[in-house]
Image (cartoon, helix red, strand yellow):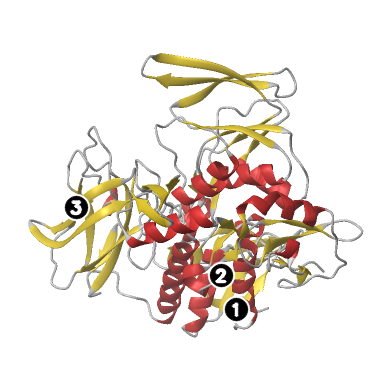
């Protein structure tokens, strides 16, 4: 192993592998660092299908998708190190690593962080047996091959929660209900149909768990549902509670370097190259924003990897930056802008979850802007302005929260900040 | 029969009825809804994924190579649970051929050495 590389990619999940492969295609020397004993990241515990259609033209399981990328890595010039945890990155791009007690340092010209996400903490982390986060449950069942309970209640209705609910059913357990505090589920319609409806699992919306019965072990949950006629209370006996509160980006290694962040959301500020506010440091995959499709993660990884390689080749121009701001409309919660200035006033309804990138280098001709909506919108209209000039408009019959909406904007000749406006 | 279309986020509530031997799909806003509604009415199928036991302990993730009839899911899971295969297993290896006469094979989706 060398000590000097053009590009170092930290985190060997799908975003990291895609990133390393893209940098390799640009002719850069690449080292990929993975803390686990295998590449693949979270995909290794995703034994269900639904991956790969748009990238490999085939319906694959998460494990198969990981294996496809690993195969590509093995057939490339990318070097990788397993069981290697990165403890620190310095501003001069020295990477401190530890591998089974052995410490060493790697130097790189550019760094891509693709360290994925973690599950959000939840209030039910109390000392009772039988409570798991959805990701934990998935790991125990799929990687350790253990059964975790007979009668389960699931709190949270995101895709992971529903995939785990079906997995429990397949392992012979009963899933008594999925409890969701919001008035609508957060999973895709496909997972609601294929994981819940197929097995008759009830979805209790507008509901939350008020308390958990049992001294040492979970013996049941008290569920409260808000209805038109007040609150409805129900006790459901169970031995297992699966909690899925969503995922959050994990990028502490860069956070320690004080990269620019969005105050409200803690999202890192990046440009269209996925470069952070510190030159030569790139952020991608779920470490940047939580994606809902593997195709988006792979694409994000490729963008970051390619640009990290180009940066290593020549110190790229970072002048001519303009910022993306959201018009103060009552429909949009926030977008992310240059220099941490949030020019958005949050009012009653929130339609947009986020917009990326927050910075655009106008040396490019076209830039793709991504955002996600907070709930399903029908007959929606997206307008993007530069100062007062409309430079992009699009109508949508339907947009749902699980899709990353893409707007390819022609920015040639654009002089001022961009404003995104969504109406429905 | 009422079926929720899964082809996109619009999640159209489809109503599929048989009229004089012909299927009628209502409630869809696009063609994909009609195709999906028909398929779900006539013969809903799913890809099944689970763990396959390895002889002497352990397991390998597996899937049906084709979607199988929805009503056979639990029979397929049972058949997988009562089988086993020796190590090593490479991804793509056929573990059970033509499971329960469905034309689908059970194939490994990861490597176990």
What chain does mark 1 sit on?
A
Q: Residues under labels 3 and 1: Cα distance?
A: 40 Å
| Residue B31 versus residue A218 in the image, above or below | below
Q: Chain of mark 2?
A: A
Disc 1 packing (10 Å; few <14; some 14–19; many ≥20): some
Question: On the image, numbered disc 3 is attached to which residue?
Answer: A381
Q: Which mark is residue A17?
A: 2
- Asked whether residue A336 is in view, the answer is yes
Q: Residues within 10 Å of mark 3 (few under 14, many from 20)?
A: some
Q: Residue furthest left?
A: A388
Point out the tag, 1 or 2, that comes first from the N-terminus. Answer: 2
Q: Quadrant of the C terminus of chain A?
A: top left
Indicate the secondary structure of the residue bearing disc 2. Answer: helix
Residue drawn at (50%, 25%), measured in percent from left and top? Answer: A208
Chain letter belonging to callout 3: A
Q: Residue furthest bottom?
A: A27
The x and y percentages for residue B61 are 72, 60
Q: Nearer the viewer, residue A26 or A354?
A: A354
At 73% across and 52% down in the image, what residue appears? B75
Name the side, left or right, on which B1 lies relative to A374: right
**Disc 2/disc 3 C-alpha distance (Å):** 36 Å
Indicate left or right for A43 with B76 as reference. Answer: left
Q: Position of residue B17 (x, y in %)?
A: 41, 49
Tell me which label, 3 or 1, sits earlier in the chain. Answer: 1
Q: Nearer the viewer, mark 1 or mark 2?
A: 1
**Of circles 3 and 1, which is in front?**
3
**Mark linked to residue A72:** 1
Residue at 53% x, 40% y is: A120
**Which dot, 2 or 3, sits closer to the camera?**
3
Which of the pair B106/A398 is nearer the observer? B106
């Amino acid at each position: 192993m060398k000590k000097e590389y053009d590009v170092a990619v930290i985190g060997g999940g799908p975003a990291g592998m895609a990133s390393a492969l893209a940098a390799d295609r640009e002719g850069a020397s690449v080292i990929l660092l993975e803390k686990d004993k295998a590449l693949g990241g979270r995909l290794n515990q995703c034994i269900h299908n639904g991956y790969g259609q748009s990238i490999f033209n085939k319906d694959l399981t998460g494990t198969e998708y990981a294996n496809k990328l690993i195969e590509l890595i093995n057939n490339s010039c990318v070097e990788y190190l397993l069981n290697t945890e990165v403890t620190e990155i310095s501003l001069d791009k020295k990477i401190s690593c530890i591998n089974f007690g052995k410490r060493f340092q790697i130097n790189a010209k550019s760094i891509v962080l693709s360290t994925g996400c973690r599950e959000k903490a939840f209030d039910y982390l109390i000392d009772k047996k039988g409570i798991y986060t959805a990701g934990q449950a998935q790991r125990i069942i799929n990687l350790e091959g253990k059964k975790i309970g007979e009668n389960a209640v699931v709190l949270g209705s995101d895709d992971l929660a529903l995939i785990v609910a079906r997995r429990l059913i397949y392992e012979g357990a009963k899933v008594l209900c999925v409890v969701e505090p919001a008035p609508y589920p957060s999973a895709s319609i496909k997972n609601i149909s294929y994981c819940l409806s197929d097995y008759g699992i009830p979805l209790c919306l507008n509901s939350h768990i008020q308390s958990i019965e049992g001294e040492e072990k979970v013996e049941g949950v008290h569920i409260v549902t808000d209805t038109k006629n007040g609150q409805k209370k129900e006790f459901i006996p169970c031995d297992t509670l699966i909690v899925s509160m969503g995922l959050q980006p994990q990028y502490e290694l860069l956070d320690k370097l004080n990269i620019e962040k969005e105050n409200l959301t803690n999202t890192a500020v990046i440009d269209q190259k996925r470069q952070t506010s510190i030159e030569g440091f790139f952020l991608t995959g779920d470490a940047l924003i939580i994606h809902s499709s593997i195709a988006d993660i792979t694409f994000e990884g490729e963008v970051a990897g390619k640009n990290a390689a180009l940066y290593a080749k020549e110190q790229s121009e970072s002048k001519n930056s303009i910022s993306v701001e959201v018009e103060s409309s009552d429909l949009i919660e926030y977008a992310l802008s240059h220099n941490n200035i949030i020019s958005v006033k949050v009012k009653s309804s929130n339609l947009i979850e986020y917009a990326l990138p927050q910075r655009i280098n106008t040396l490019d001709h076209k830039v793709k802007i991504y955002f996600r909506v907070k709930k399903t919108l029908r007959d929606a209209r997206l307008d993007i302005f530069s100062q007062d000039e409309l430079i992009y408009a699009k109508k949508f019959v339907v947009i749902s929260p699980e899709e990353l909406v893409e707007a390819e904007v022609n920015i040639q000749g654009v002089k001022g900040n961009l404003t995104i406006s969504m109406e429905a | 029969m009422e079926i929720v279309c899964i082809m996109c986020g619009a999640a159209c509530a489809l109503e599929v009825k048989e009229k004089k031997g012909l299927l009628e799909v209502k409630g869809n806003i696009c063609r994909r809804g009609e195709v999906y509604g028909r398929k779900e009415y006539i013969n809903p199928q799913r890809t099944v994924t689970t763990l396959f036991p390895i002889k002497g302990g352990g397991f390998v993730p597996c899937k049906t190579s084709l979607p199988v009839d929805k009503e056979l899911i639990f029979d397929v899971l049972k058949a997988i649970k009562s089988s086993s295969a020796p190590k090593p297993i490479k991804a793509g290896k056929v573990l059970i051929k033509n499971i329960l006469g469905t034309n689908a094979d059970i194939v490994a989706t990861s490597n176990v050495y």
